[in-house]
Amino acid sequence: MPISRRSEIAKARRLYADEELACALKETVYALDSRTIDLCLTLFRWASFRTTKAAIKLHTLLDLRGPIPTFIEITEGKLHDVNILDSLLIEPGAFYIMDRGYLAFARLYRLHQAQAWFVIRAKDNLRFIRHSSQPIDYAQGLRSDHLGVLRGFYARKHYPEKLRRIHYYDVENDKMFVFLTNHLGLEPLTVCQLYKSRWQVELFFKWIKQHLRIKAFYGTSANAVKTQIWSAICIYVLIAILKKELKLPQSLHSILQVFSVNVFAKVPLVELLADSPSQTYPLLDCNQLMFNEL
């Protein structure tokens, strides 16, 4: 990541450092996720993904105070998500929220050894040995809170320490979630709320998708595609800075949406935003670049 981008991201993070999280934690909370961007194989031979398809992946680590992207990696579409954990500079004391695509116990153990916390959704075939159970409030949707270790030779070899497994039932969607975390003392409902907060990274990807509706490329090289993606990310960060410095009341995504449909309007920013304080705009379809939803 170029120095100029790092400096603007650092500035944005400083401006949002005092923002409160939904789960009222003082620690930094990151959400890690990725999206696949489909490309035309005829034009983008360098991004070969499948027999008839080209693609790249956009990996993002989002500081949920803001939210501000703190790490961006653009890779070939074939790269598995868990490999990105090897590229992260782990912040001791921070929380890393991930979906089950990042469930690799050797890598999670490196997070644990770096004194960072993680909350990750478990896979259905997780093998776990329960050592003890902790009290829960059934009315909050909690179904169990267990301390234990992984079952299986290789799983125990890769992660030999205790883990915490929490079952949570989402009444609204009639769905059961199972979470793993290395934080043994956090309130069980807070663990569930931490995972729920990763929806912000979904909004980030949707906004990037909206701003990749490009019918004519500046070029078909890897550098040209990455430049277009970085342009959208830079705009996102600059508007985040603008929101904070001008003390705009709208949410970051509301401001981004207003700007996206008034890009050529010669109107003062305050007046433009005053006319659309809470209006939202639907994401339009994109034929050239599409994100694969999980």
Image: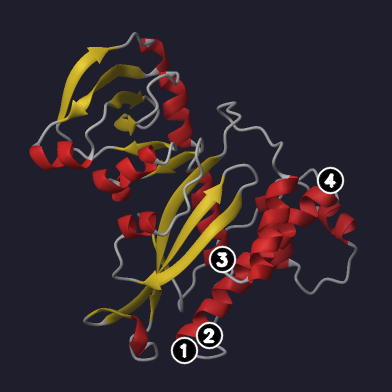
Let me know if residue 104 appears in the view: no
- From the image, tell me which residue sits under label 3: 210
The disc labelled 3 sits on which kind of residue?
Gln
For image coordinates 55% across by 88% down, the residue present is: 216
In space, the residues marked 2 and 3 are separated at their CA atoms by: 18 Å
Q: Residues within 10 Å of mark 4 (few under 14, many from 20)?
A: few
Quadrant, the C terminus: bottom left
The answer to whether one can see residue 204 in this image is yes
Residue on which the image places disc 4: 247
Q: Which residue is mark 2?
A: 224
Q: Dots 4 and 1: beta carbons under 8 Å?
A: no
* Above or below, 267 relative to 165: below
Any mark on residue 149, and which? none
The disc, 3 or 1, on the residue closer to the chain's N-terminal end is 3
Residue 139 spot, x, y in % from top left:
40, 11
Which quarter of the rendered picture does the N terminus lie within?
bottom right
Does the residue at mark 3 contact the one at mark 1 (Cβ under 8 Å)?
Answer: no
Pointer 4 and pointer 3: residues touching (CB < 8 Å)? no
